[in-house]
Amino acid sequence: MTPDQPTVFQAVGETVARASELVQLEIWLAKAELAEKSVHLKAGLATILVGCVLVIVALLLLAQALVLLMIGFGLSPLAATLIVAAAFACGGIALVAGGRRALDTETITPHRTLDDLERDRALVKEKLS
C-alpha cells in the first residue's frame, strides 16, 4: 500500500462524511421547498377567505331581495324577514349537520390501515415467539 492510497478506515470515514453532507443538503432542500409551498398555501387561503366574504355579501343581498320580493307580494316586512331568515337557518343547519357527519371519527378512521397494522403486529409477535 502506498502512502497516497487511503486506508479502509479513511475511505469509510470519507463515505460517512459525504453521506452526512448529502443528508444535510436534502434536509436543507426540503426546508426550502416547504417554505416555498407555505407561501403558496398562505396565498391560496387568503384568496379563499376573500371569496368567502364575497359569497356572504351576496347571500345577504339575496336575502334582502327575497324579503323585498315577499313584501311586494303583500307580506308584512316582519313576516317576510322571518320567513327568509327561517329558510336560511334551515339551510345552514342542514349544512352543519352534514359536515358533522362527514367529520365523524367513524367516517375518517383509516380502518384498513389499522387492520393491516394489527395483522403485522400479530405476525411479528408470532415470529418472535
Image (cartoon, rainbow, N blue to C red):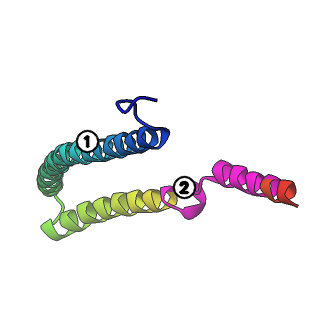
Q: Position of residue 77 (x, y in %)?
A: 13, 66
Who's the residue at 42% across and 59% down the image?
94
Q: Position of residue 35 (x, y in %)?
A: 20, 48
State the residue at coordinates (56%, 63%). 105
Q: In terms of image quadrants, where is residue 22?
A: top left
- Name the front one of labels 2 and 1: 1
- Describe the element under mark 1 as helix, strand or loop: helix
Crowd band around label 2 with a 10 angstrom C-alpha radius: few (<14), some (14–19), many (20+): few
Left or right of 20? Residue 123 is: right
Q: Residues within 10 Å of mark 1 (few under 14, many from 20)?
A: few
Q: Residue shown at 13%/58% (left/top)?
A: 71
Q: Residue at x 46, y 29 (%)?
A: 1
- Mark positioned earlier in the residue sequence (2 or 1): 1
Nearer to the camera, 38 or 3 = 3
Q: Nearer the viewer, residue 52 or 10?
A: 10
Kind of residue at badge 2: Ile
Q: How many numbered discs, if any?
A: 2
Q: Quadrant of the C terminus?
A: bottom right
The circle drawn on residue 108 is 2
Residue 36 pos. (x, y %):
18, 43
Tell me the distance, in whole angstroms, between the alpha carbons under discs 2 and 1.
32 Å
Residue 90, image quadrant: bottom left
Asked whether 72 or 42 is in front, the reply is: 42
Q: Which residue is mark 1?
A: 29
| Amino acid type, mark 1 | Leu
Q: Mark 2: which secondary structure?
A: helix
- In magenta stretch: residue 110: yes
Q: The magenta stretch spans which residues? A: 102-123
Please state the horizontal and vertical placement of residue 107, each as a whole percent of the image: 57, 56
Name, please, the residue furthest toward the front: 2
